[in-house]
Image: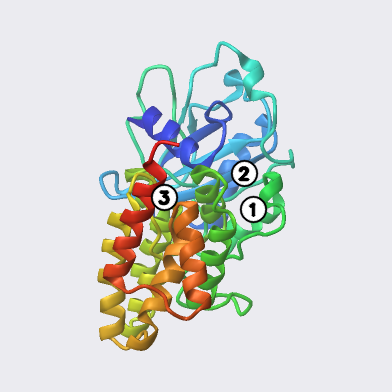
Amino acid sequence: MALAMLRDWCRWMGVNAHRSLLILGIPDDCGEEEFQKAVHAALWPLGGYRVLGKVFRKELGSRVALVEFAQYLNRSLIPQQIPGKGGPWPVVFLPQAPDSESQDRPDFPAEPQRQAGAAGEAGAASEEGAVGVSGVIDEGGSWTQQRNQAQQPVPENMAYGELRTFSGLEEPDQEEESFESWLDHANDMLYTWRHVSERERRRQLVESLGGPALDLLCGLLAENPDMPAQDCLAALVQAFGDKDTRVTARLKFLTCAQRPRETLFAYVMRLEGLLQSAVEKGAFHPVIADQVRARQVLMRARPNEMLQNKLRRMRLERRPPGFVGMLRLIRETEAWEARPA
């Protein structure tokens, strides 16, 4: 269970599982300074590292952490346990890979003895072929500090933008913006990165979070590692969105995107329910409903080229299709494109 959790966690974070380990059994009341000291004392001989996140597992009654190292991970130096609050914290890692060269390329700049919090789902520490470890992030901004200290290279097509940070704390730092402002920014960035892999979009989103927001998303991704980034945003809206039903309804509509295996027809049907709810709650005026529907399909879905061109022209002419008209256009353009050349 612990090894599977380590692989899954690394997969959706986009990191090398053979250069990562889990720390298990961290008490919920273990302070960040105490955690950092314990992890630093145990892991500094292994070289530069960073803790990628943390999550509390109800079934274990404790937290677990994911730690990534900058370079080759020498199994002989990994401690089987880390002395810490509440007793030893087991350490879990994958057995040595047959081709150790796959570990040699660092995913982030090697920096000395970085500490931070971690993410994961705990499992049995006694699994064959591995021994486990876990770590914690403080409830404040340590995630942001680690992220700035040990950034991963961003793909070329993402180099022109980076997500700002959000923690979800009740009393955030003065520099942190409101959730609604951050959400608009995150929504725009995910749209800008629409041609980037889903895993990379998800990783960038996770790395922008800290505190309770990171806890929430880590827990969701532990259960469903392939959750699309746009669904992750929707989950954050549910948890941190304005309690004003009008604002929440608007955010739910604006963050609704077509899912990877969802047809455009099914997406528009799902989107319509959110739009009608938003209109009923006063989030949108009924007069602009057709405009915002067309905009959402263009920006958050994957319409074929013919439909894209038609919708853009209709919006410019201020005569966007209604709900039924949109469904008819989808059927017509899909049928046209399916015709033999």
Which residue is at 57% across, 77% downward? Answer: 177
Which residue is at 41% across, 50% downward? Answer: 228
Q: For mark 3, give the secondary structure.
A: loop
- Tell whether label 2 touches label 1 (CB within 8 Å): yes
Depth check, mark 1 against mark 3: the one in front is 3
Residue at the front extreme of this rendering = 341
Distance from disc 1 to disc 3, alpha carbons, whole Å, reads 24 Å
Disc with the residue nearer the chain's start (1 vs 3): 1
Disc with the residue nearer the chain's start (1 vs 2): 2
Distance from disc 2 to disc 3, alpha carbons, whole Å, reads 25 Å
Disc with the residue nearer the chain's start (2 vs 3): 2
The residue that label 1 is drawn on is 146
Q: Quadrant of the N terminus?
A: top left
Nearer-the-camera pick, 151 or 204 = 204
Left or right of 260 in this view: 114: right
The residue that label 2 is drawn on is 50
Nearer-the-camera pick, 123 or 8 = 8
Query: Tag 2: residue type?
Result: Arg
Regarding residue 39, the answer to whether it shows in the image is yes
Nearer-the-camera pick, 325 or 201 = 325
Q: Give the x, y percent position of residue 258.
A: 38, 55
In the rendered view, how is the structure colored? rainbow
The residue that label 3 is drawn on is 228
**Vertical arrangement, residue 125 with respect to residue 317, above or below:** above
Q: Give the x, y percent position of residue 302.
A: 45, 53
